[in-house]
Amino acid sequence: MATPTLEKTDEAPSAADHLVTVTFRIRRFNPEEGPEAVWQDFELRIDPKERVLDALHQIKWELDGTLTFRRSCAHGICGSDAMRINGRNRLACKTLIKDIADLSDGQATKPITVEPIKGMTVLKDLIVDMEPFFQAYRDVMPFLITEGNEPTRERLQSAADRERFDDTTKCILCAACTSSCPVFWNDGQYFGPAAIVNAHRFIFDSRDEGGEQRLEILNDRDGVWRCRTTFNCTDACPRGIEVTKAIQEVKKALITRRF
């Protein structure tokens, strides 16, 4: 397949001195064209301080409008643009080209590879079916559960109690952790790290009264005990959540019933 090339010829040479030549090797899949995915190269002249998402925009807007990927806020909050970049799960909107390209004499010596996250059905190009992921999230009841009458005032919580689950409130449901997990790759029935992280957020919330219910859900054969502590999830999390630590705390709560 020919390599489309984008060069901004209307710029003065001095204005383009900071640009570098980078080849993006993207894994393409179109179910209407065939059952197999193919790799396609796109060569760009681009500022190395730009993000991978900016490069994907250039390709889609100026080279190949059929390229398909998800993105929304473009600022690392929505989690929409999680993908495998150079073999690692990352958010395209937070990954700078200069941080992942081997640059020499104004060009990258190797292509930057971009492909969909693993363990989920690819719908087209970089888009995967997220429904199983979100079903696991819904299954752990990610909402506050209380009993008795509705309070007449705000449910108060100390700073120490709030800090207990602060780390797991940072999850943006990008699926980078879950799709980096070897257990999830081999068995899509596993709840996965993200679901467990979001269960942790409520299990250890002092205002919540549904901890026992969530623990029983995660005590299932496809629950928390499937974790093999490879730390892939922690390494993949773009928000810096200590995912493996949260999973171990849920395991401990299941054994001790103290949380």
Image (cartoon, rainbow, N blue to C red):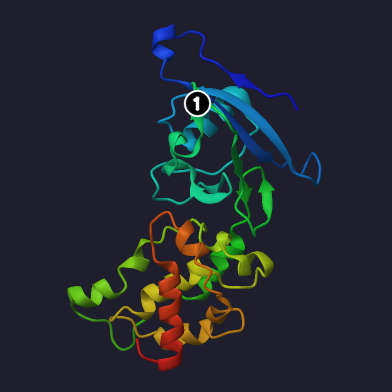
**Which residue type carries mark 1?**
Ser
Write down the residue under mark 1: 104
Q: Residue at x 44, y 25 (%)?
A: 47
Judge left or right: residue 120 versus residue 102: right
Q: Toward which corner of the image does residue 156 lie, by quadrant?
A: bottom left
Task: Answer above or below: position of 234 versus 79.
Answer: below
Position of residue 124 measured from the top left corner of the image (x, y, whole percent): 67, 44
148 or 11: nearer the viewer: 11
Q: Residue at x 45, y 88 (%)?
A: 254
Let me know if residue 249 appears in the view.
Answer: yes
Q: Residue at x 33, y 66 (%)?
A: 167
Judge left or right: residue 35 versus residue 176: right
Q: Residue at x 57, y 68 (%)?
A: 135
Query: How many other residues sit within 10 Å of disc 1, few (<14), some (14-19) or many (≥20)?
Result: few
Q: Secondary structure at mark 1?
A: strand
How many numbered discs sit on the rendered protein? 1
Q: Toward which corner of the image does residue 220 lie, by quadrant?
A: bottom right
Position of residue 132 measured from the top left corner of the image (x, y, whole percent): 61, 64
Q: Residue furthest front?
A: 104
Let me know if residue 142 appears in the view.
Answer: no
In the rendered view of the protein, which quadrant contains the N terminus? top right
Task: Answer above or below: position of 211 versus 109.
Answer: below
Position of residue 243 measured from the top left corner of the image (x, y, whole percent): 43, 67
In the rendered view of the protein, which quadrant contains the C terminus? bottom left
Position of residue 221 measured from the top left corner of the image (x, y, whole percent): 61, 83
Q: Residue furthest bottom?
A: 256
